Image (cartoon, helix red, strand yellow):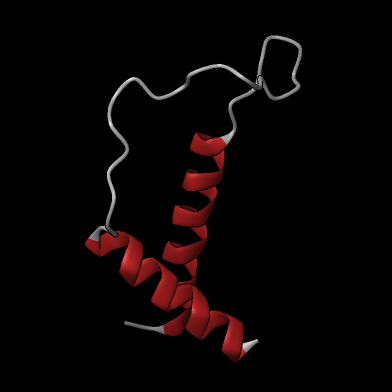
Amino acid sequence: MSIKRIAKQALSAYARSKTQASHTGPNGSPVRNRPIRTSKVKRGRSMEGQLLSKVARSLRKAF
């Protein structure tokens, strides 16, 4: 796999996590003090998360 492809994947995954994480209210500001998760928080890292962090770290070292 070329570095460019890895970088692209890492960036798209990073963007995906960003868009998921923004809990914004109707007026654009983040809503606080409101239970967001109904399901239990999964502890422990998934395989994808570990790979992603590895790639992100190597990318940071490269630049």
Query: Farthest residue toward the bottom?
Result: 62
Q: Residue at x 56, y 44 (%)?
A: 18
Residue at 54 percent across and 81 percent down: it is 59
The spot of residue 54 in percent (x, y) is 40, 77
Residue 9 spot, x, y in % from top left: 42, 63
Residue at image location 23% in from the left, 63% down from the top: 47
Residue at 52% from the left image edge and 61% from the top image edge: 11
Asked if residue 23 is positioned above or below residue 34 in the image, the reply reads below
Location of residue 1 in the rendering, given as x and y in whole percent from the top left corner: 31, 82
40 or 58, nearer to the observer: 40
Please give left or right for residue 43 compared with residue 17 in the image.
Answer: left
* Farthest residue, direction front: 33
Vertical arrangement, residue 45 with respect to residue 7, above or below: above
Asked if one can make out residue 13 in the rendered structure from this viewpoint, the answer is yes
Residue 5 in view (yes/no) = no
Left/right placement of residue 47 relative to residue 17 reads left
Quarter of the figure with residue 29: top right
Point out the image quarter for the C terminus.
Answer: bottom right
Q: Residue furthest top?
A: 26
